[in-house]
Image (spheres, rainbow, N blue to C red):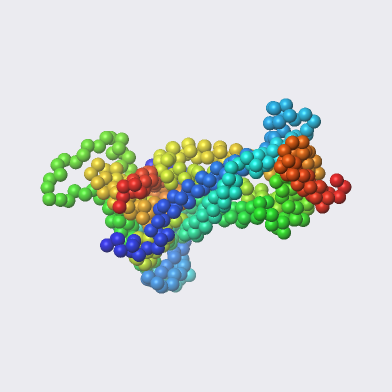
Amino acid sequence: MSNNPATQASFMQRHQFLIRRLHSLTGILPIGVFLAIHLVTNSSLAWGWFALKGRGQAEGLSIAEGGVQYFAHEVTWINTQVPHLFLTEVTLWLAIAFHCILGVYYATGGKGNLVHYKHQDNFRYTLQRLSGYFGIFFIFYHIATLRWGWTFLIPNGTKWSHDFSASTLAAALQGSTEGWTAAGVVVSLFYLVGVSLLVFHFANGIWTAAITWGLTVSEHAQRRWGYVCAGFGVSMMLAAWSALGSAMLLDYDTAQAVEASMHEPYSEQPHIEAQNESAEINNAITLQTDTQDPDG
Amino acid sequence: MGAAQASIIGSDQRKANREVAVVGRSVIFKIKRCDGPGKPWRWESFKVPTEPGSNVISSLNWIAANPITANGKTTTPVVWDSSCLEEVCGACTMVINGRVRQSCSCLIDEYAPREGDEITLEPMEKFPVIRDLWVDRTRMFNALERVKAWVPIDGTYNLGPGPKESHDHQQMRYALSECMTCGCCVDACPQFSKQDDEKNWESSFIGPQAISQARLFNEHDTGKRLKDERMDTLTGPGGIQDCGNSQNCVKVCPKGIPLTESIAAIGRSATVHAIKNFFTGK
């Protein structure tokens, strides 16, 4: 009796449970874990100087300069030391695409009723879906501009560069290499809203995932886990805001100077290959300074 | 019951309203009406005199005896469903001032304490309307069949005495057993969609009520013989995975049943069931 419609059901319906659980899983691994690492790395723009001071390397550096140095070092480390970086990235993009497409598919299946049922949980239910929709646009813009180099989407078109990670980020957020522009304000606000919503999405997502997988069963357990998720969300929010705030306050030229000085040690390395590489980097530096900073 | 019960419409506000309720006032009932399945709906207002302790059902009785709208137009009596009149059968469930609840226990003094105050009545939005405020809740009973919400004791031989149960476990199951299939939880659930066509019942979200009843019988020592079959249904199309954790169900449940705990518990069973099935299932 009940078997007949089930066999006729679509692939999505027959495997709904598994796909839905994979949707939940991808939100945490790899996407959520990546988000946490990403935000902590970026927030080093704010706390990098203190880390350098701890190692006794902050001599003569301002807090902003120290942040740039630490952050640039982190970026270099990721791009040179993380094994199979491209594979990692593609895995991440595929996971995000899966999570986004399935998320929209599921979210459009529900019909929000926050107007009549004004409860905190229902508010989060609604915001979880809205933040998901917004996050798709934000992540696309973020990756397209700062990773794929679609400079036509960046005000004044400063291309983000691994070698000048902090300064070009500041230029992308502020809207130019010479300080704030109106378009920069729009981009920065978009970032602030986008990243805040995504942090909420992740923190609330791990709260609901614990129910979905049956980890937190009792009401008390759900509340306790809620406090943990809220605490985690607040920490991630602080990391996100400090990273954004530091990049917004960063002076382009100051950051460029720190970053340029960091590439110098390469030229002192004895290997021929390294010298070739450093020559390329030095060329890149001169090109960059030539085209973007005629005074330098 | 406590927290879940108290949060239904703000008990403090309702208590305050009860204390200031004007004796001998008339209130307006704005009712969403529909003459039958597939027919268009309309609003009609009625001015109804109140008496201390009158409720929505007694007011609907008055309207049935005096089917004249507030504008003086004679109309058909408003149709509704009810039975026990003491909030244990679930038949009179409707949407009152935008929130789903039983109308028999809905006191006018708590909702409309002053002369001319308005109360809005609508049929539940997730079920097919038969007429006016009367809806067809068959889908929920169908869901109970789908999750085999019973203890299997029929057979050819005597099964002997029933299993012993600890006091705590019995208390936990007692709370779940209070479900009266009223429909509040599914009506307030943003994931539960209205399906007029019976064919779609098995593929759209089954709702908190059936999930909680599946847990009630999974937790019974004899009832758990059907656990795998229940979990097959609840991990199939429209199963537990469609829950979106808005947790409205537990807020509107008139019996204070811990529906979100049931959902999480069934979620845990579903995780185990799916893994077990992956490695040992057909």
Pinpoint residue B85: horizontal percent, then vertical percent: 32, 54
Q: Quadrant of residue A76?
A: top right
| Residue A57 against residue B54 in the figure, above or below | above
Q: Quadrant of residue B80?
A: bottom left
What's the residue at 16%, 40% (across, down)?
Answer: B161
Q: Which quadrant: the N terminus of chain A?
A: bottom left
What's the residue at 44%, 52% (across, down)?
Answer: A20
Describe residue A96's horizontal placement relative to residue B199 as left or right. Answer: right
Describe residue B158's horizontal placement relative to residue A17 as left or right. Answer: left
| Foreground pick, B161 / A38 | A38
What's the residue at 46%, 67% (across, down)?
Answer: B43
What's the residue at 70%, 27% (across, down)?
Answer: A55
Pinpoint residue B257: horizontal percent, then vertical percent: 37, 45
| Foreground pick, A181 / B22 | A181
Describe residue B70's horizontal placement relative to residue A237 as left or right. Answer: left
Pinpoint residue B59: horizontal percent, then vertical percent: 39, 59
Name of the residue lying farthest toward the left: B157
| Foreground pick, A20 / B188 | A20
